[in-house]
Image: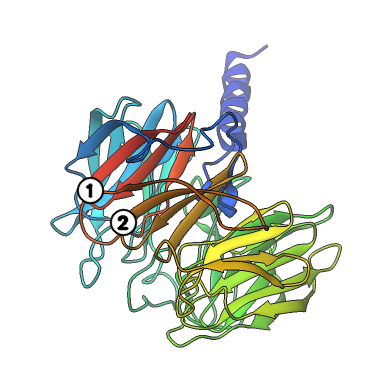
Amino acid sequence: MNKSIVFMALAIVLNTSLFAQTATVWRNGTDGVYPETGLLKSWPEGGPEVLWVFEGLGEGHSSPAFALNHIFVSTMIGQEGYIFVLDLEGKEVKRYPYGTEFYESYNGARSTPVIVGDWLYIYSGQGVIYAFEALTGKLRWKKDMLANTDGKNIQWGVTETVVVDAGLLYLSPGGKEQNIVALDSKTGEPVWTSAAKGELSAYCTPRLIEFEYRKLLVTMMASHIVGVDAETGEFLWSHYQPNQWSVHANTPVFSNGMLYCTSGYGQGTVALQLNEDGSSATQKWFNSSLDNRMGGTVLIDGYLYGSGDKSRGWYCVDAQSGEQKWSSKTPGNGVVIAADGMLFIYSDRGELVLASASPDAFEIKGQAKVTHGTAQHWAHPVINNGILYLRHGDALVAYKIK
């Protein structure tokens, strides 16, 4: 066989293999429930053991991402965005810059890196998407999404983490015509654009849902939840979901045909029933108490758990009916993730709390005060291989929870 044909075939196989690899996804698929088992069901006084602390990260509210046997964290030093690459023992391996980050208010990196094979993607608070060789920092391509579309930045900067799937990269620049877009993940060139409702973006990381005959991309824009065909960009449906500041930072949660969308500033949570191919959505219930602003909710065994915003407190809601099962004023409002039947809560007061995921009562099983780090307690923790990683501004803390 001709050698050039062999090399060409090998290149095609390698390229296909690269982009067939599973992408890292913010909040473990955006539902915030991690598949870890054998975790501690209670913590000692003072909280779980701290394995290590890395300080000197700079400013940011993003979460760590795990790939290639390393930890990747986006941050800002001065006004420059950086990717920090750490080993699993918390030692810095490399850092590389990616451009100006958001420094106008609540300074720092917002979006979490996404790694696919040896590619790393980061979407800056200024609306620029970068593709790097993950471990070396070699730039492969970049695109200013606000300059190259009719989109514009929002008050507190772009915060969505891009979604990468099957060679496509999804994000929402929020233009009148180029509202939601899909790019070729290898080149950054547009594959499709959707006008959707033509609204500004709303800080929301999209949710990709696979049906038998369709991939559906769902996100929350300034006043509407929208669904588009992920392969073509066809606008399929919308649901009116406004709030005071057009902030809808929580990625929708999906299970068994039901979509749960939570908005803060007093709006609340709506449950939408999707039809069998995701081409339509009908409201099933609405609950105004569960109005978390940006800390997410988790769905466990038919119950939604999360905190409020204007509704101070933590709530458990029946996912089928929207009926509230319990509420608690302790701890402070904030972020929730889950694993192994337990809730891991990180409040905006700097409280780290372990609680049982039960509709019967809110029972705290351990707590600690987060003393390392700087600025707001907003980042979403991550659980990886029996360790809970919590980013607080300048610091990344690794807790042993197994």
| Cβ–Cβ under 8 Å for marks 1 and 2 | yes
User: At 36% across and 40% down in the image, what residue appears?
Assistant: 47
Does label 1 or label 2 sit earlier along the sequence?
2
Residue 24: % across, % down: 52, 42
x then y, percent, for residue 93 = 25, 28
- Tell me if I can see residue 102 in this picture: yes
The answer to which image quadrant residue 14 occupies is top right
Give the residue type at disc 1. Answer: Thr
Q: Residue 168, can we see it? A: no
Q: Is residue 104 left or right of residue 167?
A: left
Label drawn at residue 371: 1
Q: Could you say whether the residue bearing mark 2 is in a helix, strand or loop?
A: loop
388 in relation to 316, above or below: above
Q: Judging from the image, what secondary structure is the residue with disc 1 in?
A: loop
Quarter of image, res 325: bottom right
Q: Relative to 97, is 135 on the left or the right?
A: right
Q: Left of 341 or right of it: where is 157?
A: left
Residue at image mark 2: 350
